Image: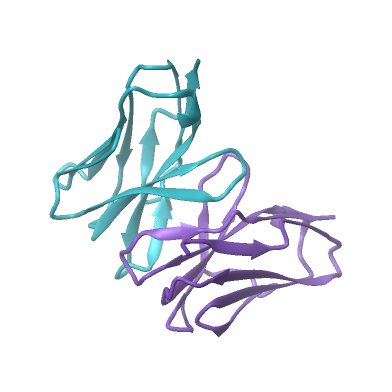
């Protein structure tokens, strides 16, 4: 079964707006990661947040982690058309190597 | 060099064929992964190699056979596949467990 569930499934916004995606998971984790995937291509790692961290920033990205609620959010500020992609959260299980991806959020940024 | 390469980019094979997918990384990573991804779905973990030893097999059918000849290379041998095995096959590597993974561009496999 999937560890992570994401919402919304799809999100359409105008360039310059912020995009927020949420991820929920079921079991305890060591870390949670966010990845981006452009259509039909490999995944690109965006950010990793460890279980003892609550918030992390990287450029226009802000990730939060609430281990009590088993949830995380990814905020992309001042979105650009180039941010159009699918975004996945991923959690580790069984000691770390077993990575389970959420269903993903498809983001479409209109120019 | 933070690149993971995969060959071939596309592969079409019949159900009786034998083929192999290849993956290579030169980042000194000790863990390598195979994922299968169907259209509009998340990647699903198939196999994990840690220090060249198979550490995770996610109950993958035996028609998929992984191999790790050395710390930089990962192969996936395919034999007697079914049409439902058509998917994007992604390879990834990481420094170790709980570290970020670097993905290759994938091999688009079609089984006819």
In this view, B64 is above or below A28: below
- Quick one: A71 or A75, which is closer to the camera? A75
Q: Residue at x 32, y 21 (%)?
A: A18
Colour of chain B in the image: purple
Q: How is the image coloured?
A: by chain
In this view, B86 is above or below B28: above
**Residue projecting furthest to the front:** B1
- Quick one: B71 or A104, which is closer to the camera? B71
Q: Give x and y (percent) for residue A52.
A: 13, 55
Query: For the image shown, how many numbered marks are present on the structure?
Result: 0
Q: Residue at x 48, y 64 (%)?
A: B1
Q: Give x and y (percent) for residue B28.
A: 43, 76
Q: Give x and y (percent) for residue B56.
A: 46, 74
Residue A58 quadrant? top left
Q: Residue at x 42, y 43 (%)?
A: A88
Lateral position of residue B49 relative to residue B109, left or right = left
- The chain assigned the colour cyan in the figure is A
Q: Give x and y (percent) for residue B58.
A: 50, 68
Residue B84 quadrant? bottom right
Lateral position of residue B99 relative to residue B52, left or right = left
- Quick one: B49 or A45, which is closer to the camera? A45
Q: Residue at x 72, y 54 (%)?
A: B86
Lateral position of residue B77 relative to residue A87, left or right = right
């Amino acid at each position: 079964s999937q560890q992570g569930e994401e919402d919304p499934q799809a999100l359409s916004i105008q360039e310059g707006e912020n995009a927020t995606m949420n991820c929920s998971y079921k079991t305890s984790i060591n870390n949670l990661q966010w990845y981006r995937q452009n259509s039909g291509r490999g995944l690109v790692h965006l950010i990793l947040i460890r279980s003892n961290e609550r918030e992390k920033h990287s450029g226009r990205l802000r990730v939060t982690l609430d281990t009590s609620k088993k949830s995380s959010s990814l905020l992309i500020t001042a979105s650009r058309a180039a941010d159009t992609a699918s975004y996945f959260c991923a959690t580790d299980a069984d000691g770390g190597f077993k990575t389970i991806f959420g269903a993903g959020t498809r983001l479409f940024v209109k120019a | 060099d933070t690149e993971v390469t995969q060959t071939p980019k596309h592969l079409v094979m019949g159900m009786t064929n034998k083929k192999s997918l290849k993956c290579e990384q030169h980042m000194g990573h000790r863990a390598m992964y195979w994922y299968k991804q169907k259209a509009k779905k998340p990647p699903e973990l198939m196999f994990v190699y840690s220090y060249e030893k198979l550490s995770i097999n996610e109950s993958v059918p035996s028609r998929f056979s992984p191999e790790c000849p050395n710390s930089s290379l990962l192969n996936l041998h395919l034999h007697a596949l079914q049409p439902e095995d058509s998917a994007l096959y992604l390879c990834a590597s990481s420094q170790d467990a709980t570290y970020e993974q670097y993905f290759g561009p994938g091999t688009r496999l079609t089984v006819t």
